[in-house]
Image: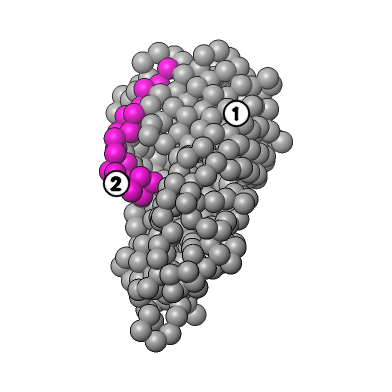
């Protein structure tokens, strides 16, 4: 029964997101440099979305048709292709925290869905859901293994799950304002949820098109990737260097150079910083029962990867690289536990995901 609240939250978010994915919705992103090939709207990286079935010379006055006419090229080129729904698996094998005994394997499994139903020719709402799980399989001596009177960290699963709500509106043909909040549970879900188990990662961002192939981005975001700086400005850009090469930067958390030998296949070179804070609950009995604390994880990753568009609706992505830095602060929540605290050693990072677009 301890999972009931979280499951209700996730299920409600999925229901809302699915119910809003109607014909008037637009994909999460169109991808890159665009061209119009009637009767479809086709981008240079393989996405085709219905634009109009009217005879040549006629105007499509539908909501979707008018949105694509005025803002389709902007949406197509502001970032590389990202599917509406993504199911991913990640692994950090044999990872160590510097100056701490033992090691761990982290297995991650994620679900992320974002839908953007149009509400006007210049704007849309955002609905969606996310589920991110980190399963840690620790060696018996990870977390001192009883050296300081505790029994080590043991195996643990940390969850982040919730909904997405927001909007996007074109202030002019070349300026897009987007704002989203992602309220949810960030916890080990080992006890009844309290207010400390909930968080609301959010952002607001302007995207300004200064050239046909250059988009400047700025705004602010709140999350727990950086322990000392949950509130930070956003600053970045997307630049189509050529028809087959683009650079996407969004500081302080990610950058990527992508090369597209064909419309349906891309090579990815980049880096990102991931992390979160989770509220954990001790499962012990006696004096330690129902003790709570916060566990923090952060990884800085450099990767190589590929993205293949199997067809208009299905894509596959794989990435591999190294953890070049990071910071971990782990606890069981028990009073006597000596927290695992320190930078990550370098290690291997692996990820594969399946994407679905509507």
Secondary structure at badge 1 equals: strand
Label 1 and label 2: CA atoms lie apart by 30 Å
Q: Percent position (x, y) of residue 356?
A: 62, 44
Judging from the image, the colouring scheme is one colour
Magenta region: 214-235
Q: Residue 149 magenta-drawn?
A: no
Residue 30 badge: none
Magenta stretch, overall SS? strand
SS category of the residue bearing label 2: loop
User: Could you tell me residue 161's position as x and y percent?
Assistant: 46, 59
Q: Residues within 10 Å of mark 1 (few under 14, many from 20)?
A: some
Which residue corresponds to mark 2? Answer: 228
Left or right of 180 in this view: 101: right
Depth check, front residue: 68 or 211:
211
Count of numbered tags: 2
Residue placed under numbered mark 1 in the picture: 268
Residue at 34% in and 29% down:
235
């Amino acid at each position: 029964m301890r999972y009931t609240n979280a499951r209700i939250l996730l299920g409600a978010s999925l229901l809302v997101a699915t119910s809003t994915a109607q014909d008037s919705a637009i994909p999460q992103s169109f991808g890159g440099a665009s061209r119009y090939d009637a009767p479809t709207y086709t981008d240079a990286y393989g996405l085709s979305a219905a634009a109009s079935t009217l005879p040549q010379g006629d105007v499509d006055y539908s909501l979707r048709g008018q949105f694509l006419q005025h803002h389709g090229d902007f949406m197509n080129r502001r970032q590389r292709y990202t599917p509406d729904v993504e199911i991913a698996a990640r692994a950090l094998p044999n990872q160590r925290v510097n100056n701490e005994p033992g090691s761990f394997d982290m297995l991650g499994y994620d679900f992320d869905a974002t839908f953007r139903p149009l509400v006007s020719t210049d704007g849309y709402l955002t609905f969606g859901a996310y589920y991110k799980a980190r399963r840690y399989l620790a060696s018996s001596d990870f977390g001192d293994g009883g050296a300081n009177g505790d029994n080590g960290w043991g195996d643990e699963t940390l969850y982040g799950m919730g909904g997405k709500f927001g909007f996007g509106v074109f202030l002019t043909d070349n300026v897009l304002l987007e704002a989203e909040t992602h309220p949810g549970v960030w916890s080990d879900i080992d006890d009844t949820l309290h207010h400390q188990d909930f968080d609301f990662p959010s952002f607001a961002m302007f995207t300004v098109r200064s050239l046909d192939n250059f988009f400047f981005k700025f705004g602010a975001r709140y999350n727990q990737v950086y322990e000392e700086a949950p509130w930070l400005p956003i600053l970045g850009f997307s630049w189509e260097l050529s028809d087959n090469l683009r650079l996407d930067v969004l500081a302080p958390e990610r950058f990527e150079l992508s090369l597209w030998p064909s419309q349906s296949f891309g090579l990815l070179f980049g880096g990102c910083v991931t992390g979160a804070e989770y509220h954990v609950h001790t499962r012990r009995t006696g004096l330690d029962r129902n003790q709570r604390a916060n566990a923090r994880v952060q990884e800085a990753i450099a990767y190589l990867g590929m993205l293949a568009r199997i067809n208009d609706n299905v894509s596959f992505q794989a990435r591999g690289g190294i953890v070049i830095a990071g910071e971990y602060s782990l606890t069981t929540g028990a009073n006597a536990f000596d927290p695992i605290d320190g930078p990550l050693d370098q290690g291997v990072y692996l990820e594969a995901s399946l994407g679905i677009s509507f």
